[in-house]
Image (cartoon, helix red, strand yellow):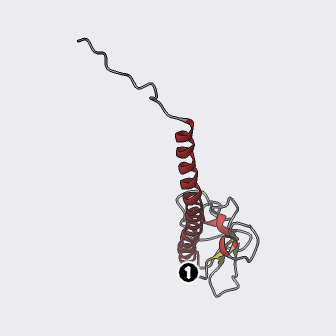
Amino acid sequence: MNRKPKRNSQAGVTLIEMLVVVTIIALFAAVVAPKLLNKTDAARKTAARVQINAFMTALGAYKIDTGLYPTNELGLRALRDKPQGVNNWQGPYLPQEIPVDPWGRAFIYKYPGEHGDDPDVISYGADGTAGGEGNNADIVSWKSQ
């Protein structure tokens, strides 16, 4: 009358079951990881475009106040620190220090620019050299792509 319930002597996880789970996780990671990396690259390009647009807005305000754009020698630094000999400077025109591009390199500033009356502001992309395609393409102030 006193019956003890039988215990399953096979309880637990087998090696095969563990291998199946690890394989499924590895396959999932192999599919998802490349898509996440592509999003990271697109986010960096977008961040560079946004920063260049912020520079162009600040440069416009600088020109309104001073009557001209900063020279190549003054560069983007003139948006934060008052240059000597520049009248009517009402800055700083950027709320924080001049940032580097999303790849950790300084933005390139050229005035006079080669693409119209405004200065050229450039990030050389992932490879850090002029030209390139895809992730290595330049992000520039004169194109809004």
Which residue type does callout 1 highlight? Ser
- Residue furthest right in the image: 129
The percent coordinates of residue 57 (x first, y second) are 53, 73
The percent coordinates of residue 123 (x first, y second) are 67, 70
Q: Residue at x 52, y 41 (%)?
A: 17
- Residue furthest left in the image: 1
The percent coordinates of residue 136 (x first, y second) are 70, 71
Q: Quadrant of residue 141?
A: bottom right
Is 41 left or right of 113, judged from the image as shown? left
Q: Residue at x 64, y 70 (%)?
A: 86
Q: Quadrant of residue 106?
A: bottom right
Classify 114 as above or below 55: below
The percent coordinates of residue 4 (x first, y second) are 31, 16
Report the label total: 1
| Foreground of the two, 115 or 10 | 10
Classify 9 as above or below 143: above
| Foreground of the two, 60 or 137 | 137
Is 23 left or right of 4, judged from the image as shown? right
Mark 1: few/some/many CA within 10 Å (<14, 14-19, 20+): few
- Residue furthest top in the image: 2
| Foreground of the two, 49 or 41 | 41
Classify 8 as above or below 4: below
| Foreground of the two, 24 or 131 | 24
Residue holding disc 1: 144
Quarter the C terminus occupies:
bottom right
Is 55 left or right of 128, judged from the image as shown? left
The secondary element bearing badge 1 is classed as loop
Quarter the N terminus occupies:
top left
- Residue furthest front in the image: 1
